[in-house]
Amino acid sequence: MGQQVLTLGLSSAEGFVPVDSELFISKSKAQELHQPFCDGRSVAAKRYKVAVNQTKPQMARDMIRRTQRTGIDALYLLADAWFSTKAMISMACELL
């Protein structure tokens, strides 16, 4: 599909609050950059590098770790069926 957004949020009976998100750029149907970033140290360049080079499970792991470092701990991890792989389940059990 090209580009997709992964969102990690805190869900409760009161509602849903987004906590972190990442842009995922797949290898197929992706739009190439028209020109390279002038400065690879910029936030946009760093986020683009992550979007192109990491898999969705790697991004999910990093988002969970960042959220835990802020002091938000969860008892459960809710995800759609796409994340029901052995690697994701093992990672969730390890981190939660």
Image (cartoon, rainbow, N blue to C red):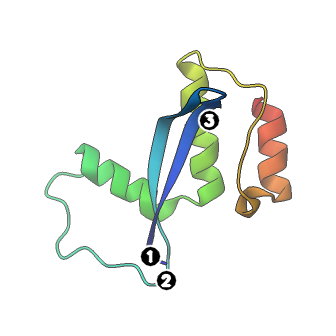
- Which residue occupies the extreme bottom position in the image? 29
Q: Which mark is residue 64?
A: 3
Q: CA distance from mark 2 to mark 3?
A: 26 Å
- The amino acid at mark 3 is Ile
- The amino acid at mark 2 is Ser
Q: Position of residue 1 (x, y in %)?
A: 49, 78
- Which residue occupies the extreme front position in the image? 14
Between 84 and 38, the one nearer to me in the picture: 84
Tell me which numbered mark, 3 or 1, is placed earlier along the sequence: 1
On the image, which quarter does residue 62 sit in? top right
Is 96 situated left or right of 14 in this image? right
- The amino acid at mark 1 is Gly
Q: Position of residue 30 (x, y in %)?
A: 40, 79
On the image, which quarter does residue 72 sit in? top right
Tell me which numbered mark, 1 or 2, is placed earlier along the sequence: 1
Residue at position x 30%, y 78% in the image: 32
Residue at position x 13%, y 57% in the image: 38
Between 1 and 31, the one nearer to me in the picture: 1
Marks 1 and 2 close (CB-CB < 8 Å): yes
Q: Judge the density around disc 2: few (<14), some (14-19), many (≥20) Cα neighbours within 10 Å.
A: few
Q: Judge the density around disc 3: few (<14), some (14-19), many (≥20) Cα neighbours within 10 Å.
A: many
From the image, tell me which residue sits under label 1: 2
Is 74 situated left or right of 33 in this image? right
Q: Which mark is residue 19?
A: none
Is 27 situated left or right of 83 in this image? left
Between 45 and 89, the one nearer to me in the picture: 89
Is 42 situated left or right of 89 in this image? left
From the image, tell me which residue sits under label 2: 28
